[in-house]
Amino acid sequence: MATKTVYLRSCGAETIAYEDQVTAGLWHIPPKATEVKPPSFTDKQICQFIDDNWVVSDIPEPEPEPEKPEPTYVDKRLNEYPSVQELVVALYDTDDKSAIEAKRAEVKKKYPKPS
């Protein structure tokens, strides 16, 4: 069975077309493929078959990630406050309740509310 190289319209990659077994010269070209060879392009470019022509364009550079804002005093406090598990234990144990209150006071002192 005869074959020939054809090209995917979406990216210019090579694929194979097969000649019909009954009718010579009739080729079964895969969908979304063309016999028109694409121009050369680099790995920083894309090549697409648009309106019966190959169009080569540069791949856009990704946008830089936005800078993360400085954490506020609320964010800092939340990271250091007692955990939910510690609070649940403190509900049943007065010694733990005092420790929880002391820990919260330390965190508030460490990260005071801005005026």
Image (cartoon, rainbow, N blue to C red):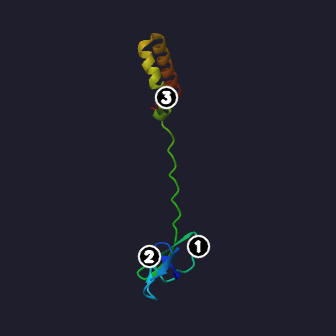
What residue would you read off at disc 3? 112
Please give the label number shown on residue 30: 2
Image check: 45 left or right of 20?
A: right
Q: Give the total of numbered labels.
A: 3
Residue 3 picture location, percent across and down: 52, 81
Residue type beneath disc 3: Pro
Q: What element does badge 1 sit on?
A: loop
What residue would you read off at disc 1? 42
Residue type beneath disc 2: Pro
Comparing labels 2 and 3, the label whose residue is closer to the camera? 2
Q: What element does badge 2 sit on?
A: loop
Residue 64 picture location, percent across and down: 53, 56
Question: Badge 1: few (under 14), some or many (20 or more) residues near its Cα, within 10 Å?
Answer: few
Comparing labels 1 and 3, the label whose residue is closer to the camera? 1
Residue 82 picture location, percent across and down: 48, 24
Q: Residue at x 48, y 33 (%)?
A: 73
The first of marks 1 and 3 along the sequence is 1
Question: Badge 2: few (under 14), some or many (20 or more) residues near its Cα, within 10 Å?
Answer: some
Report the quarter where the C terminus lies. top left
Task: Looking at the picture, tell me which residue is in the foreground, 108 or 46.
Answer: 46
